[in-house]
Each structure stands twice: as C-alpha cells, then as structure tokens.
Image (tube, helix red, strand yellow):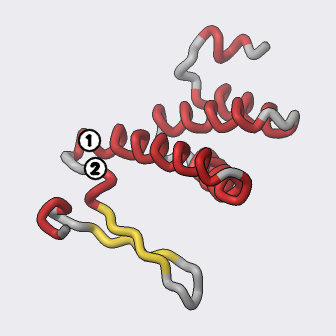
Amino acid sequence: CFPAVELDPHYVRALLRRAELYEKTEKLDEALEDYKAVLEKDPSVHQAREACMVSLSLSKEKNPHVHHLQICKLKDLGNLVLRPFGLSTENFQVKQDSSTGSYSINFVQNPNNNR
C-alpha cells in the first residue's frame, strides 16, 4: 500500500518511489506503469525515461509482440507531450548507424510531405 499516491495520484516523487519498490520486488509491469505515469506528469524525469527504455530493450529480446505494443504506448505518450507544441513523434526521424549501433534523431518539419 502506498498512501501518498492514493491521496495524490499526481505526486511524482511518490510514484517514483513506488516504481522503484515495484522494480525491487520484480513487479516490472507495475513499475513500468508508474514510470509512464511519471512521464505523463513530468517528461523531464530522467529516471523514468531511462526505466522505460530499459523495459523496451528487455521486451524486444523476450517478446517482439509485447515490444511493439510498448513502442506504440510510448509513441502515444510522446504525442501527448508534443501535441501542445503542434508536434508529434512523426516529426522526428530516427536512424541507426549499423557500424556503431548508435542512433541519430532528425527533426522533420512536414513529415507527411517526405514519404
């Protein structure tokens, strides 16, 4: 039981603490949901972004279908954050360098015109 979150579901610090507790007790789905809730309330929380990315890489290895669903959910979350600025995840083009495995991200002003 986490009374701080029950009293105030927008309390980011309490959500982070609960997510950490879920991680330590291997309740990874619950932890991921809390980290996503944190990002919806405050996209600048590095710990939550990193936890979501780690979860993505683990899900890709274990189950490609779950990985695809998580990517879709993260895109929805990204669109939620970008929408007030008139942007979407479609405005960002991600390319992986095959030699290093690193990624580059480019901004695309009119993504529908470049396809």
Q: CA distance from mark 1 to mark 2?
A: 6 Å
Judged from this view, the residue extending furthest toward the right is 25
* Total numbered labels: 2
Residue 109's spot in the image, x, y percent? 17, 64
State the residue at coordinates (73%, 53%). Answer: 62
State the residue at coordinates (61%, 37%). Answer: 35
Q: Earlier in the sequence, mark 1 or mark 2?
A: 1
| Disc 2 residue type (three-letter) | Ser
Mark 2 = which residue? Answer: 88
State the residue at coordinates (67%, 26%). Answer: 14
Q: Nearer the viewer, residue 21 or 61?
A: 61
The secondary element bearing badge 2 is classed as loop
Question: Does the residue at mark 1 contact the one at mark 2 (Cβ under 8 Å)?
Answer: yes
Residue 2's spot in the image, x, y percent? 75, 16
Q: Label 1 neighbourhood size at 10 Å, few (<14), some (14-19), many (20+)?
A: few
Residue 23's spot in the image, x, y percent? 79, 39
Q: Which mark identifies residue 16?
A: none
| Disc 1 residue type (three-letter) | Arg
Q: Nearer the viewer, residue 1 or 75?
A: 75
Mark 1 = which residue? Answer: 83
State the residue at coordinates (62%, 54%). Answer: 64
Q: Quadrant of the C terminus?
A: bottom left
Q: Quadrant of the N terminus?
A: top right
Is 10 displayed left or right of 114 in the figure? right
Is 99 displayed left or right of 105 in the figure? right
